[in-house]
């Protein structure tokens, strides 16, 4: 007997928690973005009057698309438990675009507008690469082991989603820890609060009350933040991109590995959503990702959009369709009206960041829960490159704050101090792909499918050769030494496969190990 058709809800009460979490994630990214742009000298009128409004538009567009996709999936499967994909501006690309494109062009020309135009051309190219990736995205999902995809996401969530918010939470414990324990009680302990008030809302309200009552928040800064309110709208322009191509040409090749990076990140997140119960179409999702990135560049934002890590976390928290759409509307409003400063002077950030700690916990756990136990080592090895990349990022940011860098200090000096910086760079560059490669190799080794493991190693050789992984630069024979090493790895695995097949060399295999 068929179930009667349900009335699909666009908004549910439980979407409130998801909204606060995803909105905070995007708001934090906007603040980082603005800080980076101002740090290299991009004027405020470009940063707040041109770029951020375009960022808001692209996030709003992606939120509409993913909300519609979620609604259609809910109608198709006749259920109100579908959670839409979270999205926003790619965090990884912020630093790369600012420091590898805008900064160098600005220093070379002294023209902030030309630096901006060059970054738009770069962002446009990357969006095109993402679109092209949609052609074979679903095939890749079928080929790549689940442990490799979920393991790499676990690494990203533990390092770049959970770690910094966790440290900020403990830095102001009388706000952060109180908010964190409320979230843990509500979402892991299933504790219900009076009047069924959403858990995230309770945590933020209590954290805000504590922040204001203890003197953490500054009333004068709140008053001054009202001066930043002004209407700024994005504008469509092909000319900016066309003009930027001449200056961006030397850097455009770097858009290729980052486009590939975004492509794999989207594939991973779709797999993560499916493991949580929502099966989204890979082709449609990747088309949306690439299209909104192109839209961003056409209206003035060089920062591509991306499907965010965290779908299972938001789903577990009760978020459904409306939280993504509400986030898009909220981000559009604050970027077009200049409300970023006002919001941050009302709510202490330590009251909100524990929500991201929760998301990191859920994603990290999912990688182990959704694969067979025998693949646990493959999950762990996928996390290691992310730890290397996170460590390198901390070092680079620390040294940059002192107006220096690792090269100026000396890699050998760092190594003597026990900081293996060069190893962090090699292992962590292209972390999402490196993690997937090695996790896939190990998954196939665990299955004694040595032929597939050797094929993955060959891909590692190709990616290394052109600097897609293990290098901060891209080009012909950038990673020749690593490419040779991967080739030798593939050769060793092929020899093992031959010995296994013909039972030569006295080698035996115990599948229990």
Image (cartoon, grey):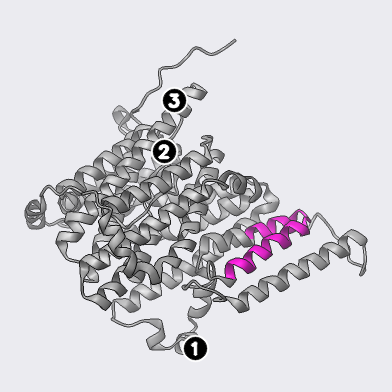
Q: In this view of the protein, which residue sits in the foreground, 456 or 310? A: 456
x then y, percent, for residue 145: 65, 50
| Label 1: few (<14), some (14–19) or many (≥20) C-alpha neighbours in 10 Å | few
x then y, percent, for residue 220: 7, 57
Q: In which quarter of the image is the N terminus?
A: top right
Magenta stretch? 439-464
Q: Which mark is residue 416?
A: 1
Mark 1 or mark 3, whichever is nearer to me: 3
Q: Quadrant of the C terminus?
A: bottom right
Mark 3 or mark 2, whichever is nearer to me: 3
Q: Residue 157 carries which label?
A: none
Label 3, on which residue?
80
x then y, percent, for residue 366: 55, 46
User: Going 43% across and 52% down the picture, which residue do you hit?
Assistant: 128
x then y, percent, for residue 349: 26, 54
Structural distance between the alpha carbons of marks 2 and 1 = 46 Å
Label 2, on which residue?
317
Please tell me whether the stretch drawn in magenta is mainly helix, strand or loop: helix
Quarter of the image for residue 57 reads top left
């Amino acid at each position: 007997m068929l179930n009667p058709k349900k009335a699909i809800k666009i908004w549910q009460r439980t979407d409130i928690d998801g909204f606060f979490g995803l909105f905070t994630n995007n708001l934090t990214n906007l603040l980082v973005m603005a800080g980076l742009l101002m740090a290299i000298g991009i004027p405020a009128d470009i940063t707040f009057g041109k770029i951020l409004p375009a960022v808001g538009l692209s996030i709003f567009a992606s939120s509409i698309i993913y909300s519609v996709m979620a609604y259609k999936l809910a109608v198709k499967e006749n259920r109100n438990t579908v959670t839409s994909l979270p999205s926003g501006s790619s965090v990884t690309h912020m630093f790369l675009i600012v420091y590898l494109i805008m900064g160098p062009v600005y220093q070379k020309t002294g023209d902030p507008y030309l630096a901006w135009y060059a970054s738009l051309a770069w962002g446009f190219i990357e969006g095109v690469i993402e679109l092209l990736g949609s052609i074979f995205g679903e095939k890749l999902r079928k080929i790549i082991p689940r442990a490799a995809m979920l393991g790499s996401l676990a690494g990203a969530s533990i390092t770049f989603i959970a770690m910094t918010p966790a440290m900020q939470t403990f830095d102001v414990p009388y706000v952060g820890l109180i908010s964190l324990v409320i979230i843990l009680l509500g979402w892991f302990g299933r504790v219900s609060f009076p009047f069924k008030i959403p858990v995230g809302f309770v945590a933020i309200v209590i954290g805000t009350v504590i922040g204001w009552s203890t003197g953490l928040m500054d009333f004068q800064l709140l008053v001054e933040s009202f001066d930043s309110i002004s209407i700024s709208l994005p504008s469509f322009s092909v000319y900016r991109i066309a003009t930027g191509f001449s200056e961006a040409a030397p850097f455009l090749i770097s858009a290729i590995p980052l486009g590939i990076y975004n492509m794999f990140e989207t594939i991973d997140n779709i797999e993560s959503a499916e493991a949580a119960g929502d099966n989204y179409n890979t082709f449609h999702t990747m088309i949306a990702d690439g299209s909104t990135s192109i839209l961003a560049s056409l209206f003035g934002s060089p920062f591509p959009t991306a499907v965010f890590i965290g779908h299972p976390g938001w789903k577990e928290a009760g978020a459904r369709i409306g939280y993504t759409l509400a986030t898009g509307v909220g981000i559009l409003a604050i970027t077009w009206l200049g409300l970023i400063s006002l919001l941050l002077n009302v709510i202490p950030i330590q009251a909100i960041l524990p929500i991201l700690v929760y998301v990191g916990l859920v994603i990290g756990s999912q990688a182990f829960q959704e694969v067979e136990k025998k693949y646990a080592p493959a999950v762990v090895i996928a996390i290691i490159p992310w730890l290397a990349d996170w460590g390198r990022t901390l070092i680079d940011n620390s040294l940059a704050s002192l107006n220096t860098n690792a090269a100026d200090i000396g890699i050998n000096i760092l190594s003597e101090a026990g900081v293996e910086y060069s190893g962090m760079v090699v292992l962590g560059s292209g972390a999402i792909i490196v993690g997937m490669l090695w996790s896939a190799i190990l998954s196939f080794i665990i299955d004694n499918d040595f032929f597939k493991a050797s094929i993955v190693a060959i891909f590692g050789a190709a990616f290394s050769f052109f600097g897609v992984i293990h290098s901060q630069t891209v080009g012909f024979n950038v990673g020749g030494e690593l490419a040779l090493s991967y080739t030798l790895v593939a050769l060793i695995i092929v020899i093992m496969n031959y010995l296994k097949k013909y039972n030569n060399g006295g080698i035996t295999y115990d599948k229990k190990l």
